[in-house]
Amino acid sequence: MLSLRKSTPETISAFLTSQAALDLSYSGVGATANTPPAGYNVDHARIKLGEGEQVFEAAKMALERWEHFNLGWVEASPADTSIREGQAVAMLARSFGIWWLNSCLIISVMNEMSL
């Protein structure tokens, strides 16, 4: 959804409600959790933040607050959306004076430390 104005929380809520009735736009839902289907490229970007449970918990809390979208031009909405399977969240972005709104559905959640 494109707009010249930033969407209000009410508009975003109505948008997410309307999107919930739609089918997903691709057939391999959840397939990238294991071996992806032919034609899919899985992008694994990793960076070491530190070591141990304290670092893991701090990183997990930052993700739960959607801080990875604090880029100045994009935000997750509602900002208090919980990260759980089946939860919908809107991505609101702005570029060159145009706002656009996309809905995303959380398909799976990983909760593990990796060494």
Image (cartoon, rainbow, N blue to C red):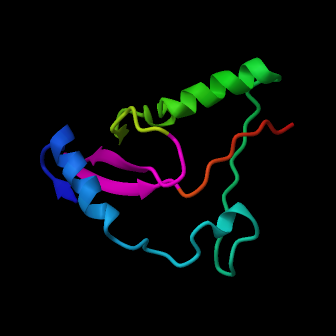
In the depicted view, which residue is nearer to us: 1 or 82? 82
> Residue 86's x, y, as percent?
48, 55
Task: Look at the image and tell me whether residue 32 can be seen.
Answer: yes
Q: Is residue 67 above or below residue 58?
A: below
In which quadrant will I find the N terminus?
A: bottom left
Q: In the picture, residue 61 is in which quadrant? A: top right
**Residue at 42%, 34% in the rendered image:** 71
Main SS, magenta region, reads strand
Left or right for 33, reference 96: right
Residue 109 appears left or right of 14: right
- Total marks shown come to 0
Relative horizontal placement of residue 39, taking residue 69 as reference (left or right)? right
Q: Is 27 situated above or below 105?
A: below
Query: Which residue is the extreme one toward the left?
Result: 4
Q: Residue furthest right?
A: 115
Residue at image location 23% in from the left, 55% down from the top: 15
User: Range of the magenta residues?
Assistant: 83-106
Q: Quadrant of residue 107?
A: bottom right
In screen coordinates, is 58 left or right of 29? right
Q: Residue at x 13, y 44 (%)?
A: 5
**Residue at image x 66%, y 58%?**
43
Q: Position of residue 103 (x, y in %)?
A: 35, 56
Relative to the observer, which residue lies in front, 68 or 110? 110
Query: Is 95 inside the magenta-drawn segment?
Result: yes
Residue 6 seen: no
Quarter holding the C terminus?
top right
The answer to which quarter of the image holds residue 40 is bottom right
Q: Is residue 57 magenta?
A: no
